[in-house]
Amino acid sequence: MKLQPRRHTIAALAAIGALAFQPLTHAQTSAPVKAVASFSILGDLVRQVGGERVQVDVLVGPGADAHVFQPSPSHAKQVAQAQVVFANGLGFEGWMQRLLDSAGYQGKPVLVSQGIQPVRSPGDHHDHKGGKHDHHHHHGEADPHAWQAVPNVITYVANIAKGLCAVDAAGCDTYQNNAGAYTGQLRALDAEIKATWATIPAAQRKLITSHDAFGYYARAYGVKFLAPQGVSTDSEASAKGVAQLVRQIKKEKIKALFVESISDPRLIEQIGRETGVKPAGELFSDALSDASGPAGTYVAMMRTNTQAMAQAIRGR
């Protein structure tokens, strides 16, 4: 007697056959695009645009200072394996070309600040007379901290999407869609920051920070920043510059004094003692906090900084 196949067996085979003909997702068909971002803020922006299609390695991680970063062999290995490298540009990563050369990286890094009108670094608080300071930023050069103005980051995002499309044409629609959605968030953030400062008279919008990292923020949102160091944290504040700053704080009755997350707090604490102004807290200038902190993403960083500065000026 000829046996008939059981119905549930036939159904199971049909289901397996149907699965075999399902189109595979990108994650199933190929590995994610390997991208390297120079520092933590940029790493977050690349992740926002790249989504699940991109694996992002960050060279200078949360809480670390890119101004004084020294690449290691493990960093060179990450770069050597990357399909695309993203850098801020504007002289921020003075170590980048040496790293690319040592890694044997054949391409050119995507400079996300391309197309942004740079602010010229004002810096006159640190002393060059001895010629001993080996830092990457000098008087009259571009201030690299362009991400401190949200409209500039909209340009960063467009450049990131373009860079990812260049190495993964199949994912270009995804990158452009992600960039568009994130740009909407950034425009809302920009409006939120402007609305916060609109409640504070322009004459009161004065703060002290560790180094000149907020020039773009100042220009975008009408806030005046004073700092004992220049645009690089590896510059030294001169005694003359600090004394001048102390006099200015007393004269103008500036009451918002901040330490930056990447900086040695001792100089700001000294200024606080000499002026009687207690430091109001910590700002995030060149690096995010870790994921559990208050500045784990770019949007969170800008919102956290703005709220802290506004509250300090209001005296709360």
Image (cartoon, rainbow, N blue to C red):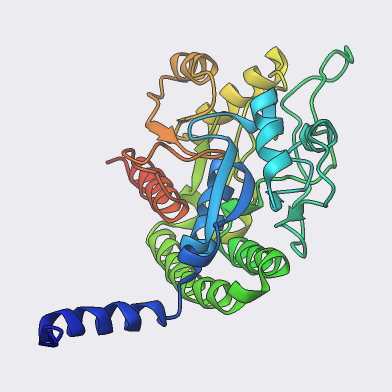
Tell me if residue 69 can be seen: no
| Above or below 284: residue 202 | below
Q: Quadrant of the N terminus?
A: bottom left
Of all residues, the one furthest to the front in this rendering is 1
Q: Judge from the rendering whether residue 146 lies leftward or rightward of residue 257; answer left or right.
A: right
Q: Nearer the viewer, residue 233 or 269?
A: 233
Q: Nearer the viewer, residue 17 or 198?
A: 17
Q: Residue at x 58, y 49 (%)?
A: 42
Residue 69 found in image quarter: top right
Q: Is residue 134 left or right of residue 199?
A: right
Q: Position of residue 269 (x, y in %)?
A: 46, 17
> Residue drawn 79% across and 41% down?
91
Quarter holding the C terminus?
A: top left
298, above or below 59, in the image: below
Q: Is residue 298 visible?
A: yes
Residue 231: percent from left, percent from top: 70, 35
Q: Residue 124's quadrant in the figure?
A: top right
Q: Nearer the viewer, residue 161 or 125?
A: 161
